[in-house]
Amino acid sequence: MDSRKKIKSVFFLCVFIASLHQCFAQIAEANGSRGVVQVGVVLAMDSLVGRVSNMCISMAIEDFYREHHNFNTRLHLSRRDSGRDVVQAASAALDLINNVEVQAIIGPQTSTEAQFLSNVANKSQIPIMSFSATSPSLSTTHTPYFIRATLSDSIQAKPIASLIKFFKWRQAIAICEDTDYGAGFVPYLNDALIDIGSHLHLGGLIPSYASDELIKKELHKVMTMQTRVFIVHMSSPLASRFFRHAKQLGMMSRDYAWIITDGLASLLNSMDPWIIDSMQGVLGVRAYIEETKRLDNFSYRYKRYYRKEYPNEIEIPHVNAFCLRAYDATRVLALAMEKSGVENVGSRQPITGQTAGNLTGISSTGPRLLSALLDIKLKGLNGNLLFVNGEIQGSSFEIVNVVGKSVREIGFWSLETGISREINRKKIDKMVDDVANLGLVIWPGESTVIPSGWVVTTNGSKMKIGVPVTEGFREFLKVEWGPLDGRSRAMGFSVDVFDAVVRALPYRLEYEYVPFADNQRKTAGTYNDLVYQVFLGKYDAVVGDVAIIANRSNYVDFTPPYTEPGVSMIVPMRKKRGSNALAFLKPLTWELWVTASCFLFFMAFVVWFLEHRMNEDFRGPLSEQVGRALYFSFSTLIFSQRDKITSNLTRFVVILWLFMVLILTSSYTANLASILTVEQLQPTVTDIQTLIKNEDNVGYQGNSFVEDLLKEMGIARSKLQALHTVDEYAKALLKGSSHGGVAAIFDEIPYIKCFLSNHPNNFMMAGLTYKTGGFGFVFPKNSPLLSDISSAVLKVTEGDTMASLESKWFRKQNTSSSWSSSDSSKGLSLDSFWGLFLIVGTASVGALIVFFVGLCNEHWNRIVSETTPVNRGFWQRIIHMAKHYDEMDLSSHTFKRKQWKEGRIENNKKVNRAPNSFRVPVELPC
C-alpha cells in the first residue's frame, strides 16, 4: 500500500511539474511577443526629489503592467543622472536619443534643464514629459514636444494674490532663485498683485549656488525696506540655507510675513527638522491633493518599497507631490505607448543642415505618440490628468502654516470660491476676506496678530515730505529760512493738518519738510512737477495745498480731501435796493396773481348764487347784484366781512375762503417787506457764459490746473491773466476788465474763502461750483502708509481739531459773501398754494351742486305741471327753472323771521293807538 501511494504521489508531482513548465513557456512566449519600448529617465539622482521620483516611476511601471498584463507594449527604462547640471542633463538626453534610441524621456527635473531639452525634443520629435519643471517661461506652444505633467507656476499667482488681499497688504517683496524657475514666475505674480491693487517689489534674485555671504547681503538689503511681506520662490536646497540665515538675522520674528510657493511648500513634510525650525510661522501655497483610499494604499507600498531600495536610511521621506506626479506621468506615458502602438522598430529620418547639432535623426513615431499623450484622460493619484495645450490644468490649492514640527492646513483656494475654510464649499461668501474663511495663523514670533506688512523706517532716516514754495495764500503754507543757519521751516494750515493727522496715527512717524525750491529759494516748478517728484522717489510724500485731480492720480495716490472741494468764481458785488414803482407786484408770480384773481370772481359768483333767493342784499337791479357780489368778494382781502349772509352753505364756503385769504395776505406782506426793505447784494457777473459773451478778462491763480479748466470751458487764452497773491486778486477785480483788470477770478473754494475772509465787503463768490477733489496729501502708489494716513485724515476732519485750525489761520467769513441764482428774492409761486386753491374750489363747487339739487327737488314738479306738451323741451324747462330761481324764496327762514318781526311791530303800533279802557292787561311770565 505504501509503495502504491509513493508511485501515485510521484505521478502527480510529474504532472504538476510538466504543467508548470508549460505555463512558464507560454509566459515566455507572450513576453517575447510584446514590444519593448525604450524610455529614458533624466533626474538628479542625488537629490530628494530625484531619488523618490525615480522610485515612484519604477512603482508605476510595476503597478501599470500588473493591472494591464495583456498589453502588447512594455516600457523599458534607461536612467541617467543629470547631476543638477544643465550640460550633464543635455548630454544624458542626447545619449538616450542617439545611442539608446528612446521613444520618450521622463524628466528633466529642473526648469533650466527643461529649457534646453525642450528644444532637443522639438528637433528630434521625441516627446519629453516633465513632472517638476514648472516655470511659465517654458512654452509648450513653441515646443510642442515638451509636455508638462505638472502645474505651471503661473497658476499659483492668483492664490498668493488672494492671500495678500485677504490680509489687506498693499505691498510685497518677491525673493526668487536666479534661474528660469525663479525669474519666470515674477511677471505673473506682479500682474496678479496689480489686479488686486497691490504692488510687488523684486527683492532680489539669488543664484542656486549662492554663498552664505551673498544670501546675507540680499537679506540685509530687503531689511532696509519698509515692506515686511516676503514671497519666496526657490528650490529646497537654496531655501533651507536662506531661511536659516533669515532666522539668524531676526527676520523670523513679529511684524514679518513669509509666503512660500508650491515648489517649496510641497516638500515641507519631507524636510529635515532643523529646516522646519527656521521656517516657523511661514505660510505656504501648494496644489491640493485629495486624500483617497488609493492614495493611502500607495503610501503604504511606497514606504515598503523605499525601505527595500534604501535600507540604510533611518527616516523615510513623506510622499510628496513630485512623487505622485512622477507616478501619474509614467502611467500616462505607458498608456499612450499602448494606444499609439509605438515600438522600437521605427526608423529615424536623418537631420540635415545646421539645426542637426549632435542629433542623429528624427523619430518617425514621435508625432503619433505625442497625439496619443495629449488625448489621455486619466484619474491619477494627484487628481485628474487632462492636458490642455500640453499642460495639466489645476484650480485648487491648499494653504498651510508651519507651526512647531508640523505643517497645519488652514484653508483652501479655488478659482470658483476664492479662499475658504473647506475645499468643498460651493456657496461664495459675501465677504471674501472674512476671518472665518481661514483657520488660525501662527505668525513668525509665535504671534496670532496679523502683521501690518510694513514698518515706518528701518535705517533711522526720516521721511522726506515735499512742500511747495508759494507767493500767495500763505495761510495754507509758507516756507521761511532762518537768517543764521539757513534752515527751512514750513508752517501753515496744511502743515498743521498733516501734523494733527500724524499725531492721530497709532505709531510714531519720523519726518521732515523739504521745500521744493531752487538755489534762489524760489519755487522749482509747478504743482504738477512737485507731485511728480513723489513718483520719481525724491520725496516720500507731499504736503500742501495740492489739488486732487485725475491726471495726477495716474502716478501717485491721494488721501481723502481735508478741504471743501470745487472750483468757483470771485466777482465784485453791487448793492441793489429792491424798490420800484411796481414792487408791490413782485411778492407773487404772475401765475399766482392770475389764479387768485380768477378765484375772486369765482367766489363772488358762488356767494351771489347761494344768497340770491333768500338774501335781499343780493337782489335788485342786475348792476346792483354784480357790484354787491364783487364788493363782498374783494373786500375780504382788506377787512373782515360784515355783510349779512343767510345760507349755511355760504357760511361754509366763506370760512374756507377767508382762511385761504389770510394765508395769502400774510405771505404777500412778508415777501413784500423783504423786497422793499432788505438791501440785496448781487454779483456783477453770474455765470461763465456772460464772461465769454462779453469777452471779459478772467483771472486764475498762477501754476494752477484752473488754467486748463478755463480753456476747456471756452475762455480764450488771450483773456486769461495769472494772479498770485491776495492783493493782486483785489486790485485786478477793482480795476475791472475794461481797465486792464479782470471781471472775475476762478479758483478753488478754499482759496476763495481765504480771499473773502480778508475782503468781505467788496467781493463775493458766484456762479456754479465745478467739482474737483479738494486738497489732499500725496503718497507714492500703493504706499503702505496711505491706508493709515487716510483713516487719520477722516478722523481729524470729522473732529473738533479742524475747526480750531481753521479759526487759527482764517478769519471768520461773512455769510453774505457767496451768491447763487437762488439767493435773489423771487415771488411766491402757485406751487406753494395750489393745495389751498384745490380745497376751496372743491368745496365751492360742492356747495353749488348741493344747492342746485335742492332747488330742482323743490320745484321740479311745479315746472313739469306748468309746461305744456309743446314746450316741455330741455331748454324750456331750464328757462322755467331760472325763473323760479330768480323768485324770492318766501318760505325760507330768513323771510319768515322778517315777516314775523314786521307783524309784531304792526301789532305794537295798533296797541299803542287803542284807548286805555280797551287795553287788555297782559300777564308776564314770572
Image (cartoon, rainbow, N blue to C red):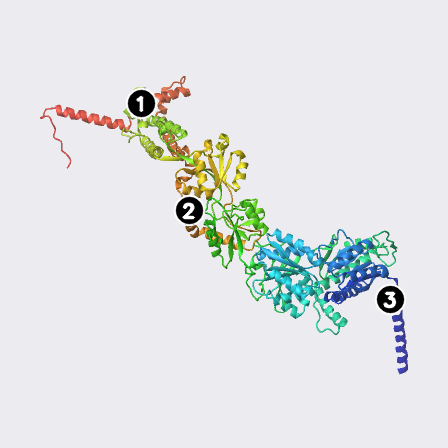
Please rate how many residues cluster around mark 3, counting C-alpha atoms within 10 Å: few if below 14, some from 14 to 19, many from 20. few
* Residue 107 shows up from this direction: no
Q: CA distance from mark 3 to mark 2?
A: 104 Å
Lateral position of residue 300 relative to residue 752, left or right: right
Mark 3 residue element:
helix
Q: Which mark is residue 27?
A: 3
Residue behind mark 1? 627
Instruction: Look at 41% across and 51% down and name the residue there.
Output: 804
Q: Which mark is residue 612?
A: none
Which is nearer the eye, 498 or 629? 498
Estimate the x, y position of residue 534 in percent, counting from the top left: 56, 50
State if disc 3 and disc 1 touch (CB < 8 Å): no
Q: Which mark is residue 810?
A: 2
Estimate the x, y position of residue 365 in percent, counting from the top left: 84, 55
The quadrant the N terminus occupies is bottom right
Amino acid type for the residue under numbered disc 1: Gly
Vertical placement of 624 versus 781: above or below?
Answer: above
Amino acid type for the residue under numbered disc 2: Phe
Q: Quadrant of residue 250?
A: bottom right
Please rate how many residues cluster around mark 2, counting C-alpha atoms within 10 Å: few if below 14, some from 14 to 19, many from 20. some
Mark 2 residue element:
loop
Which is nearer the eye, 415 or 472? 472
Q: Quadrant of residue 334?
A: bottom right
Mark 1 residue element:
helix
Q: CA distance from mark 1 to mark 3?
A: 136 Å
* Precedes in sequence: disc 3 or disc 2: 3
Estimate the x, y position of residue 172 in percent, counting from the top left: 61, 57
Lateral position of residue 487 relative to residue 127, left or right: left
